[in-house]
Image (tube, rainbow, N blue to C red):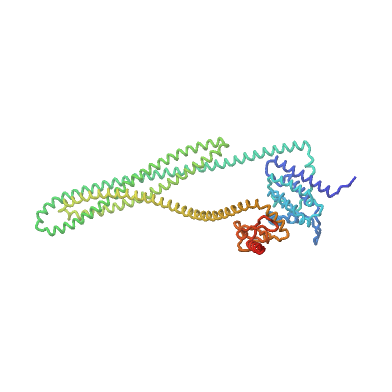
Amino acid sequence: MATKDPTAVERANLLNMAKLSIKGLIESALSFGRTLDSDYPPLQQFFVVMEHCLKHGLKVRKSFLSYNKTIWGPLELVEKLYPEAEEIGASVRDLPGLKTPLGRARAWLRLALMQKKMADYLRCLIIQRDLLSEFYEYHALMMEEEGAVIVGLLVGLNVIDANLCVKGEDLDSQVGVIDFSMYLKNEEDIGNKERNVQIAAILDQKNYVEELNRQLNSTVSSLHSRVDSLEKSNTKLIEELAIAKNNIIKLQEENHQLRSENKLILMKTQQHLEVTKVDVETELQTYKHSRQGLDEMYNEARRQLRDESQLRQDVENELAVQVSMKHEIELAMKLLEKDIHEKQDTLIGLRQQLEEVKAINIEMYQKLQGSEADLKEKNEIIARLEEKTNKITAAMRQLEQRLQQAEKAQMDTEDEDKKYLQECQSKFDGLQKQISQKEKQLVQLETDLKIEKEWRQTLQEDLQKEKDTLSHLRNETQQITSLKKEFLHLQDENHQLKKIYHEQEQALQELGNKLSESKLKIEDIKEANKALQGLVWLKDKEATHCKLCEKEFSLSKRKHHCRNCGEIFCNACSDNELPLPSSPKPVRVCDSCHALLIQRCSSNLP
């Protein structure tokens, strides 16, 4: 019986154990259906097996105190070979609880499994066997084919999702012992595992349902709080509406009082005017001789009446503004009432939705999205209502200020009327006619103002349209300029390409002509080559310029050998053909050789 190598047997055993542990880990993880924790037994056994595989054939290193034999050295070497592994090395060194190199190596293996790059890191190590020879013996598992097989098996672990807590574990003092009972399976163990898997799935479903219930309860409570806040805001808005209505009623009463006071003032003035008419008639008879003084009085009265007419017009304009503001306030109040009714309807709908949510917890999640959108819209409506109320309060303050100013103006006008009515009794009729004419002019001016306002609005709209067209035209001009630049660039490229195309066409035409000639001259060249076997022919690579004209060769200027001297010339310098002694047929010859041969022939002639 031939004895086997014990190191080979060890490698085979470790390979088989690695196969069993990786296969069992993948199968159990897929059936488990969740992310694996550090307490998972197949995962613990996998790390133990990997530790034994990496320890196989490690060289013993001497230190001052003892002999050192750890796998942290080759794993630390991965950082130099694989740049992405620098993060793992740095995070392992930063862990506070690790004190020994073996603990760092164990933490490194766990982090590599979580990153799903263990196979890539170890493949870099196996490829660099020259560097591994510093840490492992020649017969070690990582130096032989078994190591490559294990690295190939580790690729399958990328299917597994692991969530391992490296900080809390005591990796320095763990004892790595392989539990062979996990891989020697019975039928009872298989049945128990299937039951455990079913129980785990049921527990997962239960936890998922409980989490859903918690989320739904939290959303229901938040909806209740939002509904309560909406109800409070509704009550506040109703109170503010009642206050606004009371203020409007007060303003209407004040307006009625002001109108009645204006009517009384007008009646008193008419009575004064009637009295003054009688006085004016008597004064006209008495003051016929003193017309000069009356003219002066007339001018002063005319000025005073102009001032009074302006004051009356101002008062009437302010009253018209107050009336328009009241109409706007009434419209705003109507809009507010409509908004409040709509909000009440939406609140009723929300309450019905909440009652349905209490009955059906599963359908609640789909209805929550719609209710949240409704709530956002209602919040926006509430914000708008608050803005409207603020505007109404500001308008009310402005109305109060204007009413106070109108009252002061009315008092001033009453005092001035009492003063000026006594002086203006003589010429009331003429002034009344002027007032009627001025009122007609005012009506015409108001119509003109309305027409001018409409004309201004149309002009503003036209200006906005022209601005839009200008911006659009500017954008188009910018695009046109960019397109022009691109078009010029493309034109330059087109010209360059055309030049290249013409040169290539000329070269191809010359090549075609020369190929047609070469077919006829192949036999001549063969015979010339036989005759010129003793001559030295220059190589094509050595010649870059024509020997006679010294022009550089290109696609259009081709190279041609002289059959007499063997030098290389261009087409223009070697377009002669003469029969040579080695070949009776005419052969291509350069200009210099052509001249020499003709001289020889002429000298040989008698």
Which residue occupies the foreground of this view, 365 or 104? 104
Residue 479 is situated, as x and y percent measured from the top left of the image, at 47, 52
- What residue is at 56 percent from the left and 39 percent from the top? 365
Residue 429 relative to residue 525: left or right: left
Total marks placed:
0
Q: Nearest the camera: 597 or 222?
A: 597
Q: Is residue 494 visible?
A: yes
Q: Does residue 483 appear left or right of residue 282 in this picture?
A: right
Residue 522 on image: x %, y %: 67, 52
In the displayed image of the protein, which residue is found farthest to the front?
606
| Picture quadrant of residue 89 | bottom right
Q: Position of residue 315 (x, y in %)?
A: 27, 51
**With respect to residue 221, does 441 lie above or below?**
below
In percent of the image, x 50 and y 36: which residue is there?
Answer: 352
Quarter of the C terminus within the rendering? bottom right
Pick the quarter of the image with the N terminus. top right
Q: Is residue 96 visible?
A: no
Q: Residue at x 65, y 59 (%)?
A: 589
Depth check: 52 or 459 in front? 459
x and y percent of residue 242 in the render?
39, 43
